[in-house]
Image: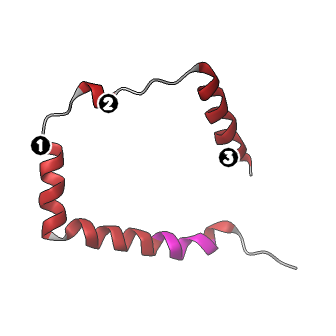
């Protein structure tokens, strides 16, 4: 049984995803909402994320398992 490599199988999915996002972002309502989002001042409290050492270790483990597989 021959398996098709990942890249040729995933390329049509990524292409469709990029086209859909491009259509959404190029619409006038999306661009005005995007402009409002980036023009409003950002609160520093919303940008801070606190992680414990054990949470960082779990995330690292999951990330590296994903990369390897």
Front residue of 23/46: it is 46
Which residue occupies 16% across, 61% down?
A: 31
Residue 31 counted in the magenta span: no
Q: Residue furthest top?
A: 53
Which residue occupies 36% across, 26% down?
A: 48
Front residue of 17/30: it is 30
Q: Is residue 45 left or right of residue 38?
A: right
Which residue occupies 79% across, 75% down?
A: 3
Q: Is residue 48 above or below residue 2?
A: above
The numbered disc on residue 39 is: 1
The percent position of residue 59, horizontal first and vertical second, equals 62, 35
Q: Earlier in the sequence, mark 2 or mark 3?
A: 2
Closer mark to the observer between disc 2 and disc 3: 2
Q: CA distance from mark 1 to mark 3?
A: 36 Å
The numbered disc on residue 47 is: 2
The numbered disc on residue 31 is: none
Q: Is residue 17 above or below residue 53?
A: below
Element type at mark 3: helix
- Report the residue marked by disc 3: 67
Q: For the residue carrying disc 1, how many other residues have a C-alpha within 10 Å: few (<14), some (14-19), or many (20+)?
A: few
Which residue occupies 52% across, 73% down?
A: 13
The percent position of residue 47, horizontal first and vertical second, equals 32, 30
Viewport quadrant of the N terminus: bottom right
Closer mark to the observer between disc 1 and disc 3: 1
Q: Earlier in the sequence, mark 1 or mark 3?
A: 1
| Residue 23, picture quadrant | bottom left
Instruction: Please provide the residue range marked out in magenta.
Output: 8-14
| Residue 21, picture quadrant | bottom left
Query: Magenta stretch mostly in which secondary structure?
Result: helix
Q: For the residue carrying disc 3, how many other residues have a C-alpha within 10 Å: few (<14), some (14-19), or many (20+)?
A: few
Q: CA distance from mark 2 to mark 3?
A: 27 Å
């Amino acid at each position: 049984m021959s398996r098709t490599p990942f890249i040729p199988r995933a390329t049509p999915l990524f292409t469709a995803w990029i086209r859909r996002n491009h259509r959404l972002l190029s619409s006038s309502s999306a661009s005005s909402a995007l402009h409002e989002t980036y023009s409003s001042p950002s609160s520093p409290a919303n940008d801070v994320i606190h992680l414990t050492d054990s949470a960082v270790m779990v995330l690292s483990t999951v990330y590296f398992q994903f990369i390897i597989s």
